Image (cartoon, rainbow, N blue to C red):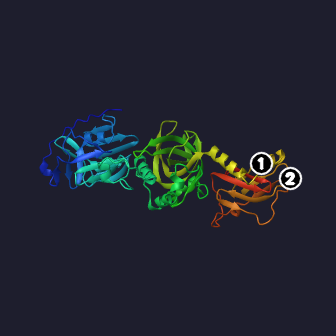
Amino acid sequence: MKKLSIAIASALISSMLFANVSFAADLKMKVNNTSVQFVYGTPFIDSGSSLLPLRDLLVALGVKNDDEHIRWNGNTQSVTIVKDSKSVILSVGSKQIYLNGKLNANLEVPAQNVNGRVFLPARAVAEALGYFVDFDSDTYTILVQNVPFGGGVKADDFNNGSTAASSSIETITSALKQYTDGVSLSAESAKVLEQNEQAFFSPDRSKLSLDKIAKAAVPVNIAKSPSSYAGDIVNITFMEIDSMREIQMGNDQTFTGAVGHTGGKHSQMTEKLEDRTYFQVFFLGKNGLTKGDSATVNGVVVGETTIELTNALGVKSTAPMYVIVAGNMISTSEDYDIRVEQSKGGKIDWSALDKETQERIERLLLVTLNKDGLLINDRTYTYGLEITKAQIQDYEYAPTSKTELPSGSLTIPLNSFKDSTGKPMTAQSGSFFVKITTNHGEFNKFVDFE
């Protein structure tokens, strides 16, 4: 990558041009309670906005002090700031600031070149890089930190060196701000998290703490209207993990960030994966998932961002990616094991069943799911099993009369399965958790919609 010099060669700008400028030698700044020393110039206030010397500000915000991470373009009078997965661009005299190629905010006061030195608007740059900013008017100090000031953490506490921890919801809010392109919790999604805070964030929550209230969601439907799911807790199965990272926040809480996908078919013509839905997942705490694992996720869809993709030919493109705050995130195999154990507990005594019956139930659950319905096969024809209930995700079917498999198979139409509101199930692609209860026991299985 070509390195750009930080040297600035421009005409001197008279201070007469800045009618509302106040040079303030006593203007100070603290980042995570550490005072910032200004060596590249004196900060000043213009029309209520604090402008700080470029390198002093960026180094204090954790940007590496080299030409790869602070790139100055003298021709366009613009600076590109690179930190972690973020790229921030702003130009002298321009009121637009860009984050990862998208307009992030319109500034009240733009970056300025004063006597050959560039000064940047402190709040706008810090917030674009994921920080929270406050101003102590009594001490004339810009306060910057990587967790919110609300929820028990006050600007005064921070100024005095307080390490009070923010709430779990605030940790997730901070994580969203730092690791997405502007996604934040809507009032609707925040309410869901508050109402189910223990199930989402408690350190000792069960691995399926949201299982009974999470609704089955088809990824392609989420992609059509992510905002319509803001007030729901959804269940997504068979999400393949593309990347996984544990991140320690400033309040000593850890969250796991993951990128994953569902679906996807490889096109030899375009060298692209088509019909694939991408997700970015934020999970408070740690889990044992790694790249390539298949996962079950219960959570709230809080917004939409993008992901950059590169195909086998090296061609780059972008695709939508949907952001989820998850309460549960475990491997699909572990999810299956837990459900089987739950099925055994009190509902079926597998040790009391003879081997033939166990094998018959296993064969029975090799079901097919398509637009015609749920097809249950009993290939031995030697014992008529009775179906007492069937469930596809949160859609249930309970026969009103005795239902056996006298001919070895049974098809239950999709519209016979109803959710808690009485709404029938409709044809939809994806993988679904199926539970069938018989007069000889119950068994669980994941089935792909064909």
Numbered disc in front, either 1 or 2 = 1
Label 1 is placed on what type of residue? Trp
Q: Residue at x 84, y 46 (%)?
A: 356
Q: Secondary structure at mark 2?
A: loop
Q: Is residue 268 left or right of residue 1?
A: right
Q: Secondary structure at mark 1?
A: helix
Label 2 is placed on what type of residue? Tyr
Q: Quadrant of the N terminus?
A: top left
Q: Is residue 96 left or right of residue 265?
A: left
- Label disc, if present, on residue 127 of the rendered structure: none
Query: Viewer-proximal residue, 101 or 88?
Result: 88
Residue lying at the far top of the rendered structure: 2
Please give the residue where the numbered disc 1 appears in the rendered image. Answer: 350
Residue 344 shows up from this direction: yes
Q: Residue at x 75, y 50 (%)?
A: 365
- State the CA–CA distance, disc 1 to disc 2: 18 Å
Please give the residue where the numbered disc 2 appears in the rendered image. Answer: 383
In percent of width and height, residue 424 lies at: 66, 64
Q: Within 10 angstroms of label 2, few (less than 14), some, or many (20 or more) residues?
A: some
